[in-house]
């Protein structure tokens, strides 16, 4: 899943969550006590939480012992978590809009805006999910400027985090292990996760920028996690093996495999004039590919994880 799709996903979840909370607040303010009225907004809130936590749910369900309904849900997650609920919200919105016009409801300007958003905004999001939104060069540049950036020196590893207006510094003395991971989530075989997990014996040092966005000032507390994730969307991500070899004196030999190409199902070659086209169909891998890049104590992956529970 690319950055554009992830943004749309979070936007869908936040929209549905705000909608559910708004309806409940309106019912409470109006003094409605019938539980039946609260069922739909509660379903909205539950659905929004599922959408926001979709990645975590997909990873949890993506196991060998997953039951068939769970596998079906993961395989069709885009339809289950996005297209279906958004379509329902849009239908409800158009029904409310129809009756409001037909029966000449006096809902006020804010009411008409809310009903119109409920009807048309889900369709806008569905279009974005199916066909994507175009991004201008300026927007692309802004996205790249907010990406984390990795660099190192003799003292340690630094991750620039412009989105949060701070830097994360990891000293070489605090670094105990590094694990490389590369896998996909079985939802639609498009969500690939590649990166490094750094296991530390001390919390990293965070340094704030002098000028901070107001939202970052509102939540100034830094995470206290001793496991740092560096994914492949980080700038200079490909330099990680060279950094480890240079500063930790460890030979890095990562067997980079493409989980999208696990088992070759079929291969066909088409010739048209002087042009030859080869079309291959692959079965993606269901397993998580993890490799130890560095460990001070020569432990296995399970032993490393056990020490950080």
Image: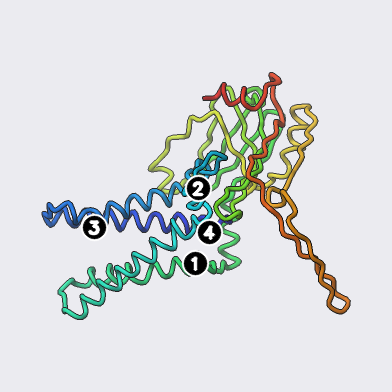
Q: CA distance from mark 2 to mark 3?
A: 35 Å
- Location of residue 118 with respect to 69 vertically, above or below: below
Q: Residue 152: horizontal and vertical position, in percent?
A: 69, 36
Relative to 88, is 196 on the left or the right?
A: right
In depth, the one of 186 and 145 nearer the eye is 186
Relative to 284, is 15 on the left or the right?
A: left
Task: Say which label, 2 or 4, has the lower sequence index.
Answer: 4
Q: CA distance from mark 3 to mark 1?
A: 25 Å
Q: CA distance from mark 2 to mark 4?
A: 26 Å
Q: Secondary structure at mark 1?
A: helix
Please name which of the two marks, 2 or 4, marks the residue nearer to the observer: 2
Task: Say which label, 1 or 4, has the lower sequence index.
Answer: 4
Task: Say which label, 4 or 3, has the lower sequence index.
Answer: 4
The residue lying at 68 percent from left, 53 percent from top is: 283
Identify the disc placed on residue 116. none
Task: Say which label, 2 or 3, has the lower sequence index.
Answer: 3
The residue lying at 73 percent from left, 42 percent from top is: 239
Residue beneath label 3, please?
23
The residue lying at 51 percent from left, 46 percent from top is: 58
Residue beneath label 4, please?
5
Residue beneath label 2, please?
68
Extreme right residue here? 274
Q: Secondary structure at mark 4?
A: helix
Identify the disc placed on residue 128. 1
- The crowd level at tag 1 (other Cα within 10 Å; few <14, some 14-19, many 20+) is some
In depth, the one of 191 and 225 nearer the eye is 191
Name which quarter of the figure residue 229 lies in: top right
- The crowd level at tag 3 (other Cα within 10 Å; few <14, some 14-19, many 20+) is some
Q: Residue 62: horizontal and vertical position, in percent?
A: 54, 43
Please name which of the two marks, 2 or 3, marks the residue nearer to the observer: 2
């Amino acid at each position: 899943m690319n950055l554009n799709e992830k943004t749309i996903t979070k936007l869908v979840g936040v929209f549905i969550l705000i909608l559910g909370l708004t309806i409940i607040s309106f019912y409470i303010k109006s003094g409605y006590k019938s539980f039946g009225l609260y069922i739909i907004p509660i379903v909205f809130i539950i659905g929004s939480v599922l959408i926001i936590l979709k990645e975590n749910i997909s990873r949890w369900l993506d196991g060998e012992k997953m039951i068939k309904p769970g596998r079906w849900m993961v395989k069709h997650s885009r339809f289950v978590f996005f297209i279906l609920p958004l379509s329902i919200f849009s239908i409800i919105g158009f029904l409310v809009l129809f009756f409001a016009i037909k029966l000449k409801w006096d809902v006020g300007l804010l009411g008409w805006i809310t009903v119109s958003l409920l009807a048309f905004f889900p369709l806008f999001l569905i279009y974005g999910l199916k066909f994507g939104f175009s991004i201008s060069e300026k927007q692309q540049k802004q996205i790249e400027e907010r990406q984390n950036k990795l660099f190192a020196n003799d003292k340690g590893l630094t991750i620039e985090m412009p989105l949060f207006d701070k830097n994360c510094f990891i000293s070489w003395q605090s670094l105990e292990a590094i694990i490389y991971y590369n896998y996909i989530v079985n939802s639609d075989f498009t969500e690939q996760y590649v990166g490094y997990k750094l296991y530390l014996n001390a919390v990293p040092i965070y340094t704030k920028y002098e000028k901070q966005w107001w939202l970052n000032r509102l939540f100034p507390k830094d995470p206290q996690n001793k496991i740092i994730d560096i994914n492949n969307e980080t700038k200079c991500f490909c330099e990680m093996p060279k950094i480890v070899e240079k500063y930790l004196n460890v030979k890095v030999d990562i067997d980079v495999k493409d989980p999208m190409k696990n088992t070759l199902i079929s291969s066909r070659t088409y010739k048209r004039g002087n042009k030859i086209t080869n079309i291959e169909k692959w079965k993606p891998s269901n397993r998580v590919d993890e490799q130890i890049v560095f460990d001070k104590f020569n432990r296995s992956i399970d032993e490393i994880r056990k020490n950080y529970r």
